[in-house]
Image: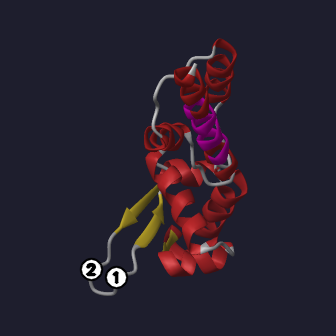
Amino acid sequence: MMEKVISHLNDSKQLKERKQLMEKQVKFSLSYYFDELKRQKNGNTRNESSEIMEQRIQSERVIRAPATATISVLRALKEAEGYTLTFMALAKSARLKLDICQEALAQLSSEELVEIEPDFDTGNDRVRLTRKGADLV
């Protein structure tokens, strides 16, 4: 009888940890919700530490710049002389925060719409619109 009480207490602690972790996170994938519901429904008490759960959640989260940010970056580069701007000038011209501008540039760079050239003298990278990017805007 005592073993059942202890196992029930352990299960409730795990559920509390999971609920607290779910409240902390902003976005979950739908598959995570379904897995969590199945665990609760089946009474599956696998020992999954909160650290492992947090890693799983972080790997499922997708961080992407908003479409409006990428469009404003492309537009600012299109209006610039020679389709080239420094990173700081681009963020200012596109009226974006630096981190959002950086995410948008990473996304555009992966799609080969912009090229980022490091400037070792000033430390301020130069961003250039590619032909593919210019045709898009």
Q: Where is residue 40 in the image (x, y as percent from the top left)?
A: 67, 21
Question: Badge 2: how crowded within 10 Å, few (<14), some, or many (20+)?
Answer: few
Is residue 60 in the magenta section? no
Assign the N terminus to one quadrant of the image: top right
For the stretch drawn in magenta, what is the main secondary structure? helix
Tag 1 secondary structure: loop
Dot 2: element: loop
Residue that label 1 marks: 123
Where in the figure is residue 45, as x and y percent of width and height?
54, 22
Q: What residue type is labelled 1?
A: Gly
Residue 64 is labelled as: none
* Residue 125 in which image quadrant: bottom left
The answer for how far apart the CA atoms under marks 1 and 2 are is: 5 Å
- Residue at coordinates 57% horizontally, 58% vertically from top-left? 104
The extreme top residue here reads 42
User: Image point 66% across, 72% down: which residue?
Assistant: 96
From this view, report whether residue 53 is shown above or below residue 122.
Answer: above
Which region is colored magenta?
A: 10-20
Q: Is residue 102 above or below residue 37?
A: below
The numbered disc on residue 120 is 2
In the rendered structure, the answer to whether residue 54 lies left or right of residue 38 reads left
Query: What's the residue type where badge 2 is placed?
Result: Phe
Specify how the rendered protein is coloured: secondary structure
User: Going 55% across and 81% down the picture, which residue do you hit?
Assistant: 89
Q: Nearer the viewer, residue 10 or 83?
A: 10
Tags 1 and 2 touching, CB below 8 Å: yes
Residue 19 lies in the magenta-colored region? yes
